[in-house]
Amino acid sequence: MRRIDIVKRDRRWIGEDGDGNVVADEPSKAEALDAVRSQGTDDDPVTVKVHLTDGTFEEERTYPRAVDPQRSAG
């Protein structure tokens, strides 16, 4: 499963894959999450690690939600 991290850089929220490629560059965390949500498909799901402004881990989400290996809030 591919992984994308959502992190804050300067005044932007960046979605970055495991190879360091930027897949989203948005002004808000919500917009960055919306942008990476479409990256996951049934055949190629994506796990999204969401970070706080200080870089610490906040939560993990899987897209599409139907392939989430663990049913949990978030």
Image (cartoon, grey):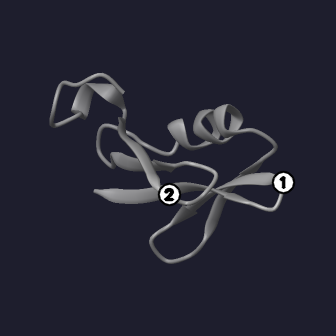
Residue at 28% x, 56% y: name it. 1
- Marks 1 and 2, how far apart at CA: 16 Å
Q: In what element is the residue under mark 2?
A: strand
Q: Is residue 42 left or right of residue 41?
A: left
Residue 62: numbered disc = none
Q: Is residue 24 left or right of residue 41?
A: right
Residue 32 spot, x, y in % from top left: 66, 42
Is any part of residue 53 visible from this angle?
yes
Is any part of residue 38 visible from this angle?
no
Circles 1 and 2 in contact, beta carbons < 8 Å:
no
Residue 18 spot, x, y in % from top left: 45, 71
> Residue 58 falls in which quadrant of the image?
top left
The residue under label 2 is: 5
Mark with earlier residue (1, 2)? 2
Which amino acid type is marked by label 2? Asp
Q: Residues within 10 Å of mark 2 (few under 14, many from 20)?
A: many
Q: Residue furthest front?
A: 54
Residue at 22% x, 25% y: name it. 72
Residue 26 spot, x, y in % from top left: 77, 46
Residue at 38% x, 39% y: name it. 41
Residue at 49% x, 77% y: name it. 19
